Amino acid sequence: MNQFSAIFNFQSLLTVILLLICTCAYLRAMTQSLLDKNKTGFLGIFWKCARIGERKSPYVAVCCVVMAFSILFSE
């Protein structure tokens, strides 16, 4: 299997982005200083993902459930 298959498959790309948002929000909840010191630059992407996960948590949770059902019951 190709190592870049998540980039070319839209459902896999959405899964990776959703997992990144959830992971960053969890890490920020456990250790705030880890992500808060890098608000700009390349590592600022992780801080922004954590903010999305915190502020839009009901929507992220619904997306996680929908993505889980689509992965389990598709194909």
Image (cartoon, rainbow, N blue to C red):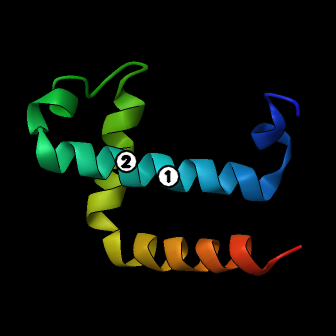
Corner quadrant of residue 40? top left
Q: Reply above or below: 56 against 50.
A: below
Q: Is the residue marked by circle 2 packed among few (<14), some (14-19), or many (20+) residues within 10 Å?
A: some
For image coordinates 25% across by 23% down, the residue present is 38
Q: Is 48 rendered above or below residue 44?
A: below
Identify the residue at horizontal 52%, vertical 56% (top origin). Answer: 18
Residue 71: x and y in percent read 71, 70
Identify the residue at the far top of this view.
41
Q: Which residue is mark 2?
A: 23
User: Which type of secondary structure does the marked residue at label 2 adopt?
Assistant: helix
Q: Are marks 1 and 2 in contact (CB under 8 Å)?
A: yes
Q: For residue 53, which numbered disc appears in the image?
A: none
Where does residue 12 sit, x and y in percent of width and height? 73, 52
- Tally the marks: 2
Q: Position of residue 13 (x, y in %)?
A: 70, 49
Q: For the N terminus, which image quadrant?
A: top right
* Residue at the spot 36% in from the left edge and 56% down from the top edge: 52
Instruction: Check disc 1: other Cα within 10 Å, few if <14, some if 14-19, many if 20+.
Output: some
Rendering quarter of residue 45: top left
Residue position marked by numbered label 1 in the rendering: 19
Name the residue at 24% across, 43% down.
27
The three-letter code of the residue at mark 2 reads Thr
What kind of residue is marked 1?
Leu
Is residue 56 left or right of 60 when viewed as pictured? left
Q: Give the left or right position of residue 32, taking residue 22 as reference.
A: left
